[in-house]
Amino acid sequence: MKVTPRLVSGTLLLACALSCCTKLESSSDTFGSGGILFGSGAATSSGGSGGTSTLGGSFPGGDGSGENGGDIGFGGAPAAAGGTRNGAGGKFSSGGEGAQGDESGAAGASGNADCVDETGFHGAGCYRCTPEDVVSLEHACTEALCTNFDNSSRLRHLGSDGRLPSLADPAAGAGGMGGSSGASQGGNGNAGSGGSAGAGYACRDLSRSGTIVYVTGSSAAKPFLQQIAQQLATEGVFIVFTSTGSCAGVDAIVNGTRMTTGAAPAPAATATYWESSSSNGKSCDLSSSGVTADLGISDVFAQTCPGFELTDLDAQNVRDAHGPIQTMTFVVPANSPYTEISAQAAYFVFGFGASGGVLDPTQDHPIWGDEKLIFQRSAASGTQSMLAGAIGVPSARWRGKTHKTSDDMAADLESAGADETTAASAIGILAADYIDTKNLRAQIRMLAYQDTRGPCAVYPDSSAGARDKQNVRDGHYPIWGPLHLLYKVNQSGDPLNESNRQEVTDIVGYLSGSKALPNGVQLLDVYAQSGLVPECAMRVTRTSDGGDITPRDPPNPCACLFEAKATGVTSCTPCTVEGDCDSGETCSQGYCEK
């Protein structure tokens, strides 16, 4: 992974300190043998050996001998003697540079002291003006719960300069800090058939009663596909779905790999279809030669999938429509004594397993070091791929026990919670919407997560018990991405298959929340109650998994509506016309949006 300096809000910072740190350019990428430096006194084109201090102030800014005397990043501690603190207005990266070699530093050229609340985030400082980039977004002042994970005292193998040890070559075999992190133990993550004889009913026979739409990919979409399919079945439209994994959904559309069912190595034993408004799903068999997928569904951007890193969807005539925003989380049994994790800590837990050396808050003993109780999914899992990009451990090199499905993961976490000792040792990963849809908050706790550039650990919601997804929607919690709805298009941008073009268009509209179901139900309402966030409720966006978050003004905002549906209350003023709202507000979807 190439690390190059770049300009961020007027200050030259080491790109790793601002945009990646543990982050990978793709979930299959890995770090070089030299490890990754979180700041400290590493040379940059701007700071020489003065370097750039780590975000959050965990490590020194160097000896100040660089060209600019060791500028610091957003929220960092003052550089060592001779360095520059960026002065009164320049505590954050937008504050410009202080005078060279001046220990106290002059005010930053573009700094604004009025934007800095020095008491925020436990004294690290927070940004109270309108956020403009990923740094100010994650450091924006908020009333949400924010706790600190002290990397310097709790990570036994973190270098004193903030350097992470490299993951070893998988071919070297398992071992300690220098050993292998292991190849993927979970195969392709698909359920497979285990030699099943199949359903005995041919999916193609549904065409006698109506139109078929073939869908494959992430299992996360199945509950919503069922709601759509139940409605469409009454109109003679049948959705046939195979749960094969996110990257299989990408492959089916980008490469045209045909959907098949049957005995292994077929990706699924049978397909599922819904034949009525009350159907819970029935099984059917695809032909031995397979069928072409009309819609591929993925939890992650296509480029996150191994082998698709350089894929240009436009060049392939593939449309990537977005469904709701999914949030991925690190989880523990509800009776675990631990409530937060940092990106660096997750790097050690899932990258090194038993030899990770993560300590409890008292620093008395190691935690999350039993690989039988470190729970992963597999390299093909969208959940794992998204988290892999965030913490810097390639999804195929995670340590711990593999699980084919989220159901398996949840069952193991609940089992671990039956004993106090195993509850304290167990850790896994799940999508937030899975936990909320299954009503598992009493059994499974989502951990607050501290990003490499974040000042403290935050939950996806404003607190552990809230359901507002506030920190996802405003950019404080970074591990999220849209559900991707992939389909081939013609030159006019319409679905390629003429025989079901309107049906595919409608299904994409239902899943995106832009179109009401035939019975009038909006999936936006369902998403809000299921731990998902419609894009119209997001104030931030991104173009890749783990990539920079940027501010966003949705064209038809629904943050107020989302809050009302998700939590039952909202402080927004109801409206029917623009005149019902104050200056600076717009009437959107029944509420005055700022």
Image (tube, rainbow, N blue to C red):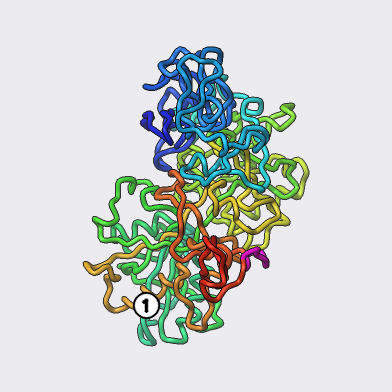
Pick the residue in front: 23 or 268. Answer: 23
Q: Secondary structure at mark 1?
A: helix
Pick the residue in front: 536 or 89. Answer: 89
The answer to whether 468 appears left or right of 5 in the picture is right
User: x%, y% of residue 490?
Assistant: 24, 68
Question: Could you tell me if residue 198 is visible in this image?
Answer: no
What is the crowding at mark 1: few (fewer than 14 residues within 10 Å), some, or many (at least 20)? some
Question: Could you tell me if residue 552 is visible in this image?
Answer: yes
* Residue at the disc numbered 1: 503
Pick the residue in front: 364 or 284. Answer: 364
Pick the residue in front: 6 or 459. Answer: 6
Residue at the far right in the pictured view: 420
The amino acid at mark 1 is: Glu
User: x%, y% of residue 549?
Assistant: 46, 46
- Kindly identify the residue that appears in the image at 63 percent across and 33 percent down: 118
- Kindly identify the residue that appears in the image at 39 percent across and 22 percent down: 46
Is 570 contained in the magenta span?
A: yes
Q: Is residue 117 above or below residue 232?
A: above
The answer to whether 28 appears left or right of 436 in the picture is left
Assign the C terminus to one quadrant of the image: bottom right
User: x%, y% of residue 543?
Assistant: 39, 50
Q: Is residue 429 above or below residue 297?
A: above
In this picture, which residue range is highlighted in magenta? 564-572
Is 71 contained in the magenta span?
A: no
* Total numbered circles: 1
- Kindly identify the residue that appears in the image at 27 percent across and 70 percent down: 496
Assign the N terminus to one quadrant of the image: top left
Dividing the picture into quadrants, the one containing residue 113 is: top right
